[in-house]
Amino acid sequence: MRTKHAIRQLVEKALDIKKLTPEIENEINSELTENGYISDVDYEALELLMAEMDAGRVKLVPSWVY
């Protein structure tokens, strides 16, 4: 993806569709692996995603369910 705050953009996508797909999760993991660090903005976005998942507003789904 290689854009500034790519993780935040991926989190926004998950929040918009209210689903964390394996594709989005894999892209987040790839960004973390490639960068080797996480910016404050991306960290806050991931915290929000986890909170939304804990609250049941975002579901973890298999790739074939949309």
Image: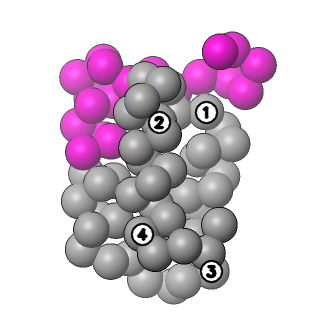
- The magenta region covers 48-66
| Alpha-carbon span between mark 3 and mark 1 | 20 Å
Disc nearer the start of the sequence (4/1): 4
- Name the amino acid, label 2: Ala
Q: Quadrant of residue 12?
A: top left
Q: Secondary structure at mark 2?
A: helix
Residue with the mark numbered 1:
21
Badge 4: residue crowd in 10 Å (few <14, some 14–19, many ≥20): some
Q: CA distance from mark 3 to mark 2?
A: 21 Å
- The amino acid at mark 3 is Glu
Tag 4: residue type?
His
What count of labels does the image hold? 4
Mark closest to the chain's N terminus, 3 or 1: 1
Q: Is residue 31 left or right of residue 18?
A: right
In front: mark 1 or mark 2?
A: 2
Residue 24: x and y, percent?
A: 60, 45
Q: Are marks 1 and 2 in contact (CB under 8 Å)?
A: yes
| Residue 50 or residue 1, whichever sits in front | 1
Image quarter hosting the N terminus: bottom right
Q: Earlier in the sequence, mark 3 or mark 4?
A: 4
Residue drawn at point x = 62 percent, y = 80 percent: 34
The numbered mark, 1 or 2, whose residue comes first in the sequence reads 2
The numbered mark at residue 14 is 2
Kindly identify the amino acid type of the residue bearing the numbered disc 1: Thr
Question: Could you tell me how far apart the alpha carbons at marks 1 and 2 are, in whole angstroms?
Answer: 8 Å
Spot occupied by residue 16 in the image (x, y as percentages of width and height): 42, 30
Reply yes or no: does residue 3 show up in magenta: no
N-term-proximal mark, 3 vs 2? 2
Find out whether the residues at labels 4 and 2 contact each other: C-beta distance under 8 Å: no
Q: Please identify the quarter of the rendering in which residue 41 is found.
A: bottom left
- Residue at the outermost right position: 64
Identity of the residue furthest to the top in this view: 65
